[in-house]
Image (tube, rainbow, N blue to C red):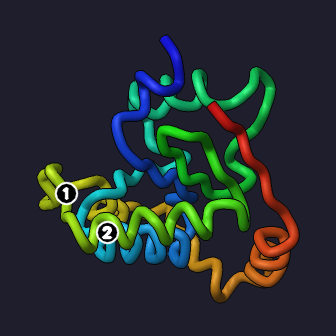
Amino acid sequence: MTSKTIVDGPILIYDNTCSPCWKYAKIARRLSRGRIRLLGHYDVTDDLYKIKEVVFPAGYDPTIMSWLINNRGAYGGTAWILPLTKEIILGFLFGSSRNTSKLGVEKDKENNNIVACSRNPGWFQRMSYFLKNTKRFTF
């Protein structure tokens, strides 16, 4: 199975244990009118395991940053800003064929493990890591 066959549309993999992270993921999904599919790093789903297995090299830990995965590659850190913007514009212009009523983020509101990273001293370190680092895996 190749990465192009497993990725049927843009996917944003984010830290679903971090409050600001799931908030920006929810905003990205809403702005793209449901075009972007959301998966949390810590979701226990077969889809997530398959995607991580196919997209990322063996031994690589993708949980160090959020990822936008589309049919061209996986973009992490600052590398996903332009592809994410493109997907949001495409979703805004053309909408989505997906059912946007429940795409995964709603359950995070009930998750007791969400950390308010914005109040955590590690938030500044996390943001500076995001701004300094970028990673890309092309297909």
Q: How many marks?
A: 2
Q: What's the residue type where badge 2 is placed?
A: Ser
Q: What's the residue type where badge 1 is placed?
A: Ser
Q: Residues within 10 Å of mark 1 (few under 14, many from 20)?
A: some
Q: Is residue 73 above or below residue 134?
A: above
Q: Is residue 102 left or right of residue 2?
A: left
Q: Considering the image in quadrants, where does the C terminus appear? A: top right
Of 73 and 77, the residue lying toward us: 73
Mark toward the start of the polypeptide (2 vs 1): 2
Quadrant housing residue 129:
bottom right
Q: Is residue 49 above or below residue 2?
A: below
Q: Give the number of the disc on residue 32.
A: 2
Residue at point 80%, 83% (across, down): 124
Quadrant housing residue 115:
bottom right
Which secondary structure, mark 1?
A: loop
Of 76 and 90, the residue lying toward us: 90
Give the image location of residue 28, x and y in percent.
Answer: 40, 71
Give the image location of residue 123, x and y in percent.
Answer: 74, 80
Q: Is residue 138 left or right of residue 47?
A: right
Q: Residue furthest top?
A: 1
The answer to whether mark 2 and mark 1 are in CB contact below 8 A is yes
Quadrant housing residue 23:
bottom left
Query: Whole-Å distance between the Cαs marked 2 and 1?
Result: 8 Å
Q: Is residue 128 left or right of residue 22?
A: right
Residue at point 36%, 62% (across, down): 108
Residue at point 72%, 67% (across, down): 78
Residue bearing the label numbered 1: 96
Q: Is residue 83 above or below residue 132?
A: above
Of 119 and 85, the residue lying toward us: 85
Which secondary structure, mark 2?
A: loop
